[in-house]
Amino acid sequence: DAGVIQSPRHEVTEMGQEVTLRCKPISGHNSLFWYRQTMMRGLELLIYFNNNVPIDDSGMPEDRFSAKMPNASFSTLKIQPSEPRDSAVYFCASSPGAAGVYSPLHFGNGTRLTVT
Amino acid sequence: TQLLEQSPQFLSIQEGENLTVYCNSSSVFSSLQWYRQEPGEGPVLLVTVVTGGEVKKLKRLTFQFGDARKDSSLHITAAQPGDTGLYLCAGGQGGKLIFGQGTELSVKP
């Protein structure tokens, strides 16, 4: 089991550029989550999918953020255009079912995004 | 608005000391999980508590879920430098997990 794989590990970009973060969940897991972590706000849930369908995107901060899950083994989080306040560590996590009682989250190692 | 409040936010202690971290909310959760995160890595699950009043032990770590399922605590006995890290509580609601701000623990030898 390779775990949740995120790429890239680090991304440095200039304000206004498009950024795409990628995630490969654990095989067989049918829920996928995107979180953002900052010192000020901690871990914030951005969006989550169940069986490739977006269930709750209420945490997506603005229309500049979009997420897709075209199949069970791949998801992307896109920011366009990026702004300095988007700088954070973005985590992808997957779970065998709905997160909570019997379905812990398995996190990737995150993508550290810096927007200058 | 944070649904889960953790305290303290930072804790620096000497090896061998005991400590307790608290996780409080005004909301009821179907379950509560504790995670530990090390620098450069994602959080890793320590334990899940489900029943009000439940107590679980993991070696030197004791986790308790409040009777009303609104709060939880993590107690570490005889802390070791290897316990250093960010401890996060997370409440389950509607198929998703909401995380607290975390407690940054530093255990000095």
Image (cartoon, coloured by chain):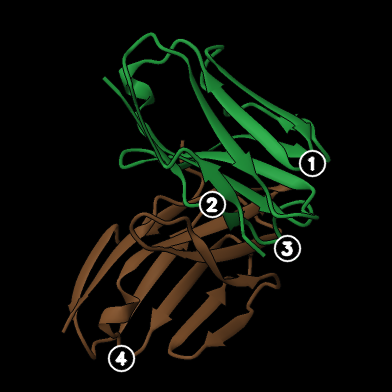
Chain colours: A green, B brown
In percent of width and height, residue B93 lies at: 69, 48
Question: Mark number for residue A42?
Answer: none
Give the mark nearer the N terminus: 2 vs 1. Answer: 1
Residue at x-position 68% and y-position 48%: A25
Cα–Cα span, label 2 and label 1: 16 Å
**Which three-letter amino acid code belongs to the residue tagged 2?**
Gly
- From this viewpoint, is residue B94 visible? no
Neighbor class of circle 4 (other Cα within 10 Å; few <14, some 14-19, many 20+) is some
**What residue would you read off at disc 4?**
B78
Give the mark nearer the N terminus: 1 vs 3. Answer: 1
Quadrant that contains the C terminus of chain B: bottom left
Does label 2 lie on the same chain as label 4? no
Give the mark nearer the N terminus: 3 vs 2. Answer: 3
**What residue would you read off at disc 3?**
A101
Of the pair B66 and B6, the residue shown nearer to us: B6
**What residue would you read off at disc 1?**
A72
**What residue would you read off at disc 2?**
A108
Residue at x-position 51% and y-position 21%: A61
The chain under label 3 reads A
The chain under label 2 reads A
Of the pair B38 and A24, the residue shown nearer to us: A24
Determine the residue located farthest toward the right in the rendered image. A51
In percent of width and height, residue A31 lies at: 75, 46
- From this viewpoint, is residue A31 visible? yes
**Which three-letter amino acid code belongs to the residue tagged 3?**
Val
> Looking at the image, is B14 positioned above or below residue A87?
below
The chain under label 4 reads B
Cα–Cα span, label 3 and label 2: 20 Å
Q: Is residue A14 left or right of residue A28?
A: left
Neighbor class of circle 2 (other Cα within 10 Å; few <14, some 14-19, many 20+) is many
Cα–Cα span, label 4 and label 3: 29 Å
